[in-house]
Amino acid sequence: DTAVSQTPKYLVTQMGNDKSIKCEQNLGHDTMYWYKQDSKKFLKIMFSYNNKELIINETVPNRFSPKSPDKAHLNLHINSLELGDSAVYFCASSQERGGGKTQYFGPGTRLLVL
Amino acid sequence: GDSVTQMEGPVTLSEEAFLTINCTYTATGYPSLFWYVQYPGEGLQLLLKATKADDKGSNKGFEATYRKETTSFHLEKGSVQVSDSAVYFCALSGGSNYKLTFGKGTLLTVNP
């Protein structure tokens, strides 16, 4: 009965490779997010989708491309991986937009680029 | 733009000690305020939240009060336990800007 799930949990890959991280939520929420947590634990929004529409796109290299096939899924594809992409990537979801809406986070995907 | 400043850690306490983690914010309008907790190797969990001035959020013995006059949302617990050891994040989400803006996190270690 996992609410927000991500796969894989760990991802080790070589520089220059292309990889994808998948996220699924079974909460019936209509808004999903990707956050990046760096080695110092700092968390920053990357993208957000509402009803499959991109609504937040922060200053992220265009090597990162989110894709939302439906409201319950938001995947993150990364092209030409670089060392600096090593981080923990968290998916989250919330019901509707709005500042007071609680976001529920997945367990994270730990990406290590060698 | 919006920002959150929380006290830098790490914070090390003995079991049953009193905990305060300071958090102040800068935002336009009237943001909602959150505390999230991240246990080792896990994702973030909502600890508590407050959506308007003077609201008090509380959960698991933790409390925080939304103070508009001082733009603060300090986290407190009267008696910490070893199981409270984690990283605590203060965050805000303002009006139609529904993204969460996080502070840098505070690592709390509670020793028996």
Image (tube, helix red, strand yellow):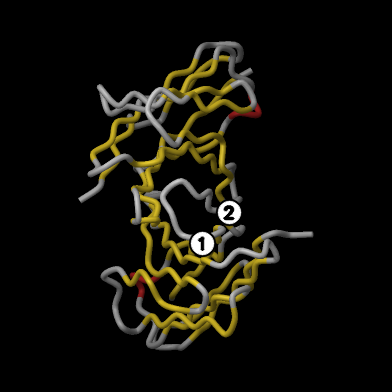
Q: Chain of mark 1?
A: A
Q: Residue furthest left?
A: B1
Location of residue B43 with respect to B81 vertically, above or below: below
Question: Is A81 or B102 nearer to us in this picture?
Answer: B102
Which residue is painted at 60% across and 63% down in the image? A29
Location of residue A41 with respect to A84 vertically, above or below: above
Q: For the residue marked with disc 2, what is the amino acid? A: Tyr
Which residue is painted at 35% across and 43% down in the image? B104
Which residue is the site of mark 1?
A90
Which residue is painted at 54% across and 34% down in the image? B48
Tag of residue A70: none
Marks 1/2: CA distance?
A: 10 Å
Q: Nearer the viewer, mark 1 or mark 2?
A: 2
Location of residue A47 with respect to B105 vertically, above or below: below
* Residue A18 placement (x, y as % from top left): 46, 88
Q: Is residue B60 left or right of residue A64?
A: right
Which residue is the site of mark 2?
A104
Could you say which quadrant of the image residue B74 lies in?
top left
Q: Is residue A19 left or right of residue A44?
A: right
Q: Chain of mark 2?
A: A
Identify the element where label 1 is drawn.
strand
Question: Is A71 or B23 nearer to us in this picture?
Answer: A71
Could you say which quadrant of the image residue B96 lies in?
bottom left
Q: For the residue marked with disc 1, what is the amino acid? A: Phe
